[in-house]
Amino acid sequence: MGVAQGRVRTGRLAWLTLAVVVLACSGVSGAIPAGPEVVTSWQRALRYEAQNRRIFIDSYHAHGPHDAAWNAAAEHALDQMSQTWMYVAMPPAIKVSREDAAAALRQAIDAGCDDPIVLGAMGLLQYDLQDYKAAEPLLRKSLDVFRKGDYPAILHLWTVSYLAQLPDLKWRKDVRKRLIDEAIAASIKAFTSDFFNADDQQLIAHNIGLRCIEAWSFDERKRFDEAFTAAEADVDPWLYHYLHGHFLVDQAWKYRTSAWAHKVTPEQWKKFGETLEVARQHLVAAHRLHPEWPEAAARLIPVAMAGATPNQSPRYWFDAAVKAQFDYRPAYKSLRWALRPRWGGSYAQMVALGQECVGTGRFDTDVPGTMLAVYRDLVSELGDSHERVTKIPTLFGALDHMFEGYAKSEVLSQRARDMNQSRRAALSWRFGRYNAAGKMLRQLGDRAQFVEFKAFGGDPAEAPGECFARSGDVAEATMQADDLLDDGEYDRASEAYQKLAREHADVEPLARYLTLRADEAAKLSDFHVGRRVAIQPDADYHHWRIIDGRWDHDSLGDTIGAGVNTKMHTACNIDFGWRFELTGEMDFSNANSSPAVSTRSDCRCI
């Protein structure tokens, strides 16, 4: 069985190899327009900033309390808020971090500022920074004023919508319903207000539609769509067609459900097709009104994927979207999904899209970074197996080229450069290029970000150390210890790893990796002479791999797992072979019951 399974995999990967090579030679690369004249998120960021200044700074001047003691600090803080409160891809578009803006707002508040716009802005940022306890009183205090005062309705909407999303309130259905109803009313008021002009509609579609409404449940968004449709006569035509069409795409899939195609009923297929057609009409109407805006075209990609635009492929609408804005992220995300085999695409087409994005050379945007997203998609498609993905030819070269391009980009901060180079080292580790990986980590020194090894399925506690162990002067001695382990000389292998760990104790990742290898060899030695081996995971889950669920330890050191979407899966990485006896004790608890139910079970497997 094992041999046959291996043959099947080899054959599939051989086909994949051929497909990628053929496509790579087909001349697809370069189709995405990427010249200096294209519109990017940088231009959108400038418009965001101008709109935000009107919302925050002009409104601050027109309303609310002012005091010479904190007026200058408040204006500076709201200027910082205007530069960070936007949805754009990457630097240089974002010039001020959330943390920097929050620090400026805190300075104004500490100086005595109690202006609701300043307090509300601080609450919004604290939410984004996941300090929900600090966010709630700030949002509540500013909301009390926005409900009564003559402030722009968008401030009221942001505040009440973010308040409804707070973890402590999100699951209190009665409270949340009142807040969402208030948010819906505020959104309609904002959309129909003369505060915004025709040129603002694209940005408020994001500032309201994506920032707030998309975070709501389907039923809440349906209530919004009903109110929004009722107000059609007072809403900008592009905005109406885009947001209503956007919702109808979700409505269509709700009718279809996520069931396998053969389980979808004829009535469900009928509603799916009819609703998707209406969505298509609205989105096409929006695109015709403003073809220079990418939103409607990007939303038509999944519509085309489902076959609702028979004369236009997903790529057709992708091209229309990136012509409007080169680095419009939703367009790339939607096309990546449409290129998966389940929708008629292929692994080869997925890789080709990533190569095409790297080939644009626009490392001042996140478009070349699509190659890394494609890698993640391939891992997902191939059974969450990073090992199988490494068999795809041209993949390493495309990813390495991407990292090299970002390393030379002038728009990245030093921290972003270090993250990029750490990921590049992780890439080399994943593809077995230990010398390159070790060299990069040694050059980074203390700036290396080991957590980035997770991007390629690596354990940050072990993988960086393996890069050091299999490169440089220590590589030969590590290989000799590996040979002892492979030959079943477990005690000698453990001693060899321990000796190396002592000799290189000053290089912490290397010493940790070698110590873990020594421990693995010692466990195998005990196992093969018939002694029981304790494999209870330690606090850092050394020798274990978490696959599904959330895993931790209680105060007694016992392992605790919680299912995510009903899945719980963790596996020991030590290869004890096929024949072993496993004993353990497990408690199965239902934390959702009242009172909680717990069942204890002794486990013995052979």
Image (cartoon, rainbow, N blue to C red):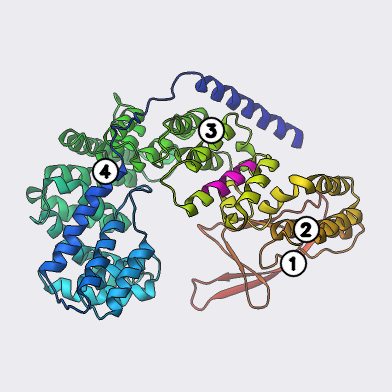
**Left or right of residue 229, residue 400 in this image:** right
**Left or right of residue 58, residue 159 in this image:** right
Tell me where residue 469 appears, x and y as whole percent. Answer: 75, 50
Sequence-first disc among 4 and 3: 4
Determine which residue is flagged by label 2.
504
Q: Are marks 4 and 2 in contact (CB under 8 Å)?
A: no
Q: Which circle marks residue 584 in the picture? A: 1
**Which element carries disc 3, helix, strand or loop?**
helix
Q: Residues within 10 Å of mark 3 (few under 14, many from 20)?
A: many
Q: Residues within 10 Å of mark 4 (few under 14, many from 20)?
A: few
Determine which residue is flagged by label 4.
43
Sequence-first disc among 1 and 2: 2
Magenta highlight range: 420-428
- Using the image as rendered, state which of residue 541 and residue 84 is in the foreground: 84
Residue 535 drawn in magenta:
no
Residue 122 in view, yes or no: yes
